[in-house]
Image (cartoon, rainbow, N blue to C red):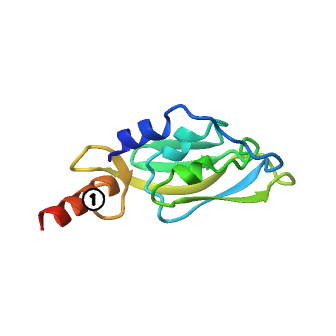
Amino acid sequence: MNRRELLSTVLSPAKVMVPPALSHSSVEINDKCIGCNVCEAVCIWGAIKRLEYGNSVSIILSPGKCNGCGKCERACIFHGIKVTGESRRDRSDACVALLEFETRDCVSCGDRFRDTGGDTCPFCARKKGRLAGIQG
């Protein structure tokens, strides 16, 4: 499954259950994030944005828009994002940079991904691993 397939699967119409009283939750992104943009795509509140400039990417959170529904966390197959549920009501609603990183193009599919030293994105690397297990 590549990034485009994952986004189309995740964005299919579904009812969204929004838990009450979790407005302005805290969101954390860890080093497992590959910058695939799924979290931004599934956030119906527009709380997460992926900003690109050249080969650099920043993942930005607007805390005032996040209600803690956790859809971004459930959509991330790499477990790169976590909604803590910790209220941010007493904090500023100013945007926060959660993660900044350099990107590169995957030699297999052409998608941009977080540069970790490899030539293929994690989607293509997973696919290669599965195919090697079947063929080997």
Q: Residue at x 66, y 42 (%)?
A: 47
- Secondary structure of residue under mark 1: helix
Front residue of 50/121: it is: 121
Image coords of residue 3 (percent x, y)? 37, 44
Q: In the image as oriented, which residue stretches furthest toward the top?
A: 13
Residue that sits furthest to the left in the current view: 135
Q: Residue at x 40, y 43 (%)?
A: 6
**Side (left or right) of 66 relative to 35:** right
Q: Quadrant of the C terminus?
A: bottom left
In the displayed structure, does residue 135 sit left or right of residue 123?
left
Mark 1 nearby-residue class (10 Å; few <14, some 14–19, many ≥20): some
Number of marks in the rendered image: 1
| 105 and 108: which is toward the camera | 108
Q: Quadrant of residue 44?
A: top right
Residue for badge 1: 125
Q: Residue at x 49, y 33 (%)?
A: 12
Name of the residue lying farthest toward the right:
90
Residue 96 x, y percent position in the rendering:
67, 51
| x 26%, y 55%: residue | 127
Q: Give the image location of residue 2, x and y in percent.
A: 33, 46
Residue 37 on image: x %, y %: 48, 45
* Residue 105 shown left or right of residue 56 in the figure: left
The correct choice, above or below, for 93 with respect to 116 in the image is above
- Amino acid carrying label 1: it is Ala
